[in-house]
């Protein structure tokens, strides 16, 4: 499986390390889908226990900052799993998400791999830059990038703490979110990228709580 650069991407992180500064004042916007946040936080917590330094990025990170962007997907940057691959897959599969095996032209998941063992073999063989995990029951999708395009540890060291109903998520700093969006814009042409960049730039002078 190869990562679809046309969709762009982003990170998560949790518990064992002290959380950094609070997020800047948030503007009123759309709330992330609450039913998903609990599961996503649990997955991130499990990845953190494996020292994979997950960091939330992408459209959902902007939603948590107050953007009116419409998205249901979560994007994370994590460290290369290496010997922790089986444990990383357990974090997703134990919570109903399976590795995507096929995407259509619109980037939507059309097939998944139900076997963890087969999923692990597929990832080891293909060595992709990222992977997609999907819950066929309710449409929850989590896109994961492996130390790409910025290493997870770098993003985690500068990350913000985002509160969820069951804990906290590591979220990329606004500076890194902007940098990631700039990188994505060079590889594709989407109006949402321009809107996201304008939103992040408009927040640069907001006071911090």
Image (cartoon, grey):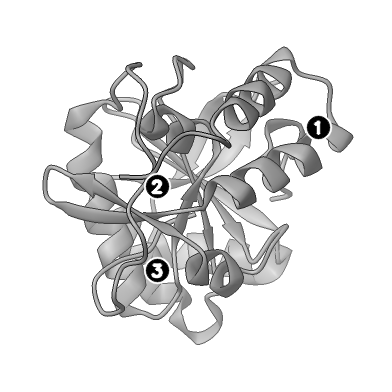
Residue drawn 61% across the image and 35% down it: 102
Can you say whether 2 is above or below 116 in the image? above
Mark in front: 2 vs 1: 1
Residue drawn 73% across the image and 13% down it: 191
Q: Image quadrant of residue 19?
A: bottom left
Among numbered discs 3 and 1, the one appearing first in the sequence: 3
Residue drawn 44% across the image and 33% down it: 60
User: Quick check: 153 left or right of 186?
Assistant: left
Helix, strand or loop for disc 2 = strand
What's the CA distance linking mark 2 and mark 1?
A: 29 Å
Query: What x and y, as percent, mark residue 38?
Result: 18, 44
Question: How busy is the neighbourhood of tag 1: few (under 14 within 10 Å), some, or many (20 plus)?
Answer: some
Front-most of residues 23 and 139: 23
Q: Mark 1 = which residue?
A: 185
User: Quick check: 113 left or right of 136?
Assistant: right
Query: What x and y, as percent, mark residue 162?
Result: 30, 48
Residue 98 at least partly seen: yes
Tell me whether circle 2 and circle 3 mark residues in contact (CB < 8 Å): no
Mark in front: 2 vs 3: 3
Q: Mark 3 = which residue?
A: 88
Among numbered discs 2 and 3, the one appearing first in the sequence: 3
Q: Mark 2 = which residue?
A: 98
């Amino acid at each position: 499986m190869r990562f679809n650069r046309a969709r762009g991407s982003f990170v998560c992180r949790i518990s064992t390390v002290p959380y950094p500064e609070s997020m800047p004042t948030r503007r009123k916007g759309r709330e992330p889908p609450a039913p998903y946040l609990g599961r996503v936080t649990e997955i991130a917590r499990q990845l953190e226990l494996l020292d994979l330094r997950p960091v939330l990025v992408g459209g959902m990170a902007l939603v948590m900052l107050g953007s009116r962007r419409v998205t249901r997907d979560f994007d994370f940057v994590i460290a290369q799993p290496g010997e922790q691959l089986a444990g990383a897959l357990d974090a997703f599969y134990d919570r109903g998400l399976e590795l995507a095996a096929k995407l259509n032209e619109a980037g939507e998941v059309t097939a998944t791999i139900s076997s963890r063992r087969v999923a692990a073999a597929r990832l080891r063989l293909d060595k992709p830059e990222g992977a997609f995990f999907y819950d066929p029951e309710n449409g929850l999708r989590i896109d994961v990038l492996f130390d790409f395009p910025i290493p997870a540890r770098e993003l985690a060291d500068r990350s913000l703490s985002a509160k969820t109903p069951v804990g906290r998520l590591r979220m990329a700093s606004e500076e890194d979110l902007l940098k990631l969006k700039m990188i994505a814009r060079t590889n594709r042409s989407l109006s949402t990228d321009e809107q996201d960049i304008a939103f992040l730039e408009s927040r640069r002078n907001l006071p911090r709580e």
